[in-house]
Amino acid sequence: MSKTLKFLGLALAIFWALSPSGTWASDPEEIVIASGGRGGFYQAVGRALRVVLSHDDGLPTEVKATAGSMANLEALNDPANPVNVALTQADALQRFLAQHPEFKDRYTQLADVGKECAFLITRREDNIRSLDALAQAGPGRAIALGEAGTGAAVTWSQMTALKPSLSTIRPESLGLIEALLAMGPAAPVQDAPIAMMIVQRPMAVATPLEVVLRNTNDYSLVPIVKADLQDAGDPSGAPDYNYEKVVVGLARDHQTSVDTICTRGLIVASPQKLSPKTIQVVDDAILTSFRYLMPASR
């Protein structure tokens, strides 16, 4: 064999050894990430993770837009569903485990993606400034919680368990933008939800909450304080929430602070659908992917 052919062969071997796909002895497993609604923080996390996994690690990666935490966990738990990595609120994961005890052996937690807080929104003209006022004004009315399968529905359910007087308000699966329009100044009051609730990272890019902060003549944020959620004490199995005053809003001239409850965002994976090697690669990629997220989320 000529020296030229030997050199080309050595160069080709080095190329494959250093290229991302060259790290896999066989076809790499495909990563399918259940994220969240379009434009939300969970989808941003999924897309950043896809960049690292596909470019740096040579793993084909798909990010699916979903309704949210509970829908993600259902997909992860379904053997016939290709989803093998999912984002979820911690309180939603605890609720799902209570409903599906077998799931404790079907997931592994990879990462904590940070604080996620509940933001309760009402029409400003309704003059609702507390949970007690909401409970008094709300019987027979609805609260919009996003599409069916969101983590916000779990958080609201837990709030009604802690404060039963809120249970007279009917949870409704209604898109957040649709809810804002229905609660807007031009909408008939009798057809509008009494409130809507979003659970998200306080400083994440999220259109619905930015609309609220830029239109304070139309909408109000209702504080959620620990003293207001002590009607029934903590029921058995209740998730732990932190009660905090958080700053919300990306634009400084529209920022405000509000008392609320916070849970955590998590990334989980299925050891039944992914090999230990691939799970480790995903775990390692998460930290790198956060570099893409920090400028947009903080």
Image (cartoon, rainbow, N blue to C red):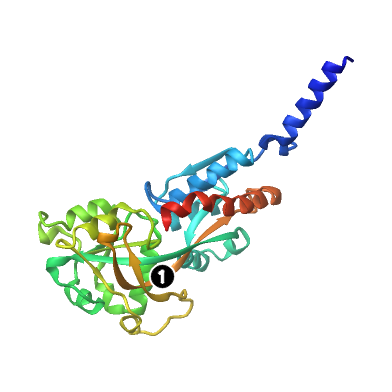
For image coordinates 65% across by 51% down, the residue present is 279
- In-front residue for pair 11/273: 11
Establish if 15 lies above or below 73.
above
- In-front residue for pair 201/172: 201
For image coordinates 38% across by 57% down, the residue present is 204
Establish if 112 lies above or below 34.
below
Q: To which quarter of the image does residue 245 belong?
A: bottom left
Dot 1 amino acid type = Cys
Side of 111 relative to 261 (left or right): right
Q: Which residue is mark 1?
A: 262
Q: Position of residue 56 (x, y in %)?
A: 62, 41
Q: To which quarter of the image does residue 11 belong?
A: top right
Side of 116 relative to 19 (left or right): left
For image coordinates 64% across by 52% down, the residue present is 284
Neighbourhood count class around disc 1 (C-alpha, 10 Å): few under 14, some 14–19, many 20 upward: many
Direction right: furthest residue: 1
- In-front residue for pair 217/150: 217
For image coordinates 23% across by 59% down, the residue present is 212
Secondary structure beneath dot 1 equals strand
* Residue 16 visible in this rendered orientation of the protein: yes
Q: Position of residue 202 (x, y in %)?
A: 37, 63
* Residue 27 visible in this rendered orientation of the protein: no
Side of 1 relative to 118 (left or right): right
Q: Position of residue 96 (x, y in %)?
A: 49, 64
Q: Position of residue 1 (x, y in %)?
A: 89, 15
**If the image is split into quadrants, where does the C terminus sit?**
bottom left
Q: To which quarter of the image does residue 234 belong?
A: bottom left
